[in-house]
Image: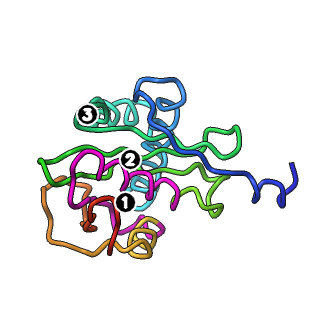
Amino acid sequence: MSDAATLRLPWAVSAEPAGSPDAGALLREYYTEVADRYFALHEDRRSTPEEIAEGLAEYPSADLAPPGGVLLVARHGDEVAGCAGVRLLDARTAELKQMFVRPDRRGLGGAGALLRAAEAAAVRLGAERIRLDTRLDLVEAVALYRRHGFLEIDPYHDDLYAEIFFEKRLDGGLLRG
């Protein structure tokens, strides 16, 4: 397919069980990428398969399911291309988790489509705000969240890998920054 044809492909985002083959592959790719970037920065190496398995076990996705969560899978044309999870932290606060777009589909609008779908899912879950954490070395993610109206907030948990925290207010199905 030509580059021009790839640019015109539509994005579709839908809920999918975290245990589905497509979701499982995306979550593994997500963990591999963030682990590889962490180890490259701090230890000048890539992650091992054992470390990826440990990370998947330490940060399970079982809570990204109804009634208090959802895993969203994005397809670009017919290709599985990204994911984002939403879970409730409390009755009015949702959290964005495992936001990922495959490298060969980045820059084509998928991250924005996933964020819009995640925000809409949070509203359907009853949330008034959506929060997230990320690492400072994930500069693309930090820029994406700022570009989409997320504001930096004080830490809301103490995970070792969370270095910067964001929140966006959600207003009755209409989003405002």
Q: Nearer the viewer, residue 25 or 36?
A: 25
Determine contact: label 2, label 3, CB under 8 Å: no
Q: Which residue is mark 1?
A: 42
> Disc 2 vs disc 3: which is toward the camera?
3
| Above-or-below relation of 117 to 56 | below
Determine contact: label 2, label 1, CB under 8 Å: no
Alpha-carbon span between mark 2 and mark 3: 12 Å
| Above-or-below relation of 76 to 57 | below
The three-letter amino acid code for the residue at tag 3 is Asp
The three-letter amino acid code for the residue at tag 2 is Gln
> Label 2's element?
strand
| Above-or-below relation of 170 to 36 | below
x then y, percent, for residue 150: 32, 71
x then y, percent, for residue 141: 43, 65
Q: Which residue is mark 2?
A: 98
> Label 3's element?
loop
Using the rendered image of the protein, determine whether residue 121 is visible from the camera's viewpoint: yes
Q: Which residue is mark 3?
A: 63
Determine contact: label 3, label 1, CB under 8 Å: no
Q: Residue at x 63, y 64 (%)?
A: 107
For disc 1, the neighbor class at 10 Å (few under 14, some 14 to 19, many from 20) is: few
Region of the chain picked out in magenta, as a range: 112-140
> Label 1's element?
helix
